[in-house]
């Protein structure tokens, strides 16, 4: 029998995010992409997953924004989680600068609309040694497929976040965090404190600065996921 693993994507990401990974993982693993539910805030998105995920305990993987939502789901409903794997995310509140930038972006989008992700923005999400055309085009394609309405909804609904560290510690769930050492989206202080206080946390640091690890490090991710599942 195959082991089901449920995957939550990041902002403006769809099933293309996991395409390469699906071709690499063991035949004993079934990767199941879950679209991020549309809702008004993080808790509503999280609660919608109760109706999407199986009622039994699951293996849950989250990337970037999906990583925060997966962590929030585990914090709220630890009895529904068998094991947690978080990619390119730390479960803490956004800083004031990030919040202000998002609020300005929402205001701009409502006035002028969304023209899609630029090539420069897509490149900035990748490590400088992984900026090939295929990966850049996948990021831009996912953004186009989801469109302006989804982008505005995701930004508005997910700006207000809380620090999940104590709830994750209290959950007693085994969890793995995988991120690049120079990823600017990662709060290293938060991660170090969580790992220091929680014996159930495993941290895997990838060399480089890439954020889009499911795309640019699919082979490494495959190895880490199989170790996470079968060790």
Image: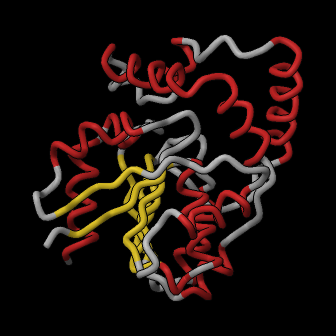
Residue farthest to the left, as pictured: 27
Identify the residue at horizontal 28%, vertical 70% (top origin).
228
How far across and down, in percent of the image, does residue 19 sit? Answer: 28, 37
Query: For residue 5, which quarter of the picture?
Result: bottom left
- Residue 118, relative to residue 91: is it above or below? above
Query: Is residue 117 found left or right of 14 in the rendered image?
Result: right
Q: Is residue 40 left or right of residue 77?
A: right
Q: Position of residue 100 (x, y in %)?
A: 87, 36
Question: Which percent across, then down, holds residue 217?
Answer: 29, 41
Quadrant of res 215? top left
Q: Is residue 144 above or below residue 100?
A: above
Residue 231: give x, y in percent of width and height.
Answer: 20, 78
Q: Which residue is outermost to the front? A: 51
**Residue drawn at (76%, 46%) of the image:** 157
Name the image colouring: secondary structure
Residue at position x 34%, y 55% in the image: 32
Residue nearer the viewer, 198 or 222:
222
Q: Residue at x 85, y 19 (%)?
A: 108
The answer to which of 24 and 45 lies nearer the viewer is 45
Q: Classify the position of the N terminus by image quarter.
A: bottom left
**In this picture, is 42 found above or below 60?**
above
């Amino acid at each position: 029998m195959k082991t089901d693993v449920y995957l939550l994507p990041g902002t403006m990401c769809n099933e293309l995010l996991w395409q390469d990974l699906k071709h690499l993982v063991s035949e004993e693993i079934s990767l199941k992409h879950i679209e991020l539910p549309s809702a008004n805030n993080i808790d509503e998105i999280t609660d919608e997953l109760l109706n999407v995920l199986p009622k039994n305990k699951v293996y849950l993987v989250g990337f970037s924004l999906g990583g925060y939502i997966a962590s929030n789901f585990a914090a709220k409903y630890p009895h529904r989680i068998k094991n947690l794997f978080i990619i390119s995310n730390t479960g803490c509140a956004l800083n004031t600068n990030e919040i202000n930038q998002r609020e300005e972006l929402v205001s701009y989008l409502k006035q002028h609309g969304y023209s899609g992700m630029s090539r420069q923005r897509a490149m900035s999400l990748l490590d400088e040694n992984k900026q090939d055309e295929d990966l850049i085009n996948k990021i831009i394609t996912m953004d186009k497929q989801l469109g302006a309405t989804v982008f505005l909804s995701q930004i508005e609904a997910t700006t207000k976040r809380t620090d999940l560290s104590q709830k994750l510690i209290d959950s007693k769930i085994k969890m793995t965090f995988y991120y690049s050492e120079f990823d600017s989206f990662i709060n290293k202080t938060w991660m170090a404190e969580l790992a220091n206080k929680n014996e159930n946390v495993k941290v895997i640091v990838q060399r480089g600065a890439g954020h889009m690890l499911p795309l640019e490090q699919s082979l490494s991710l495959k190895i880490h996921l199989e170790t996470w599942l079968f060790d």
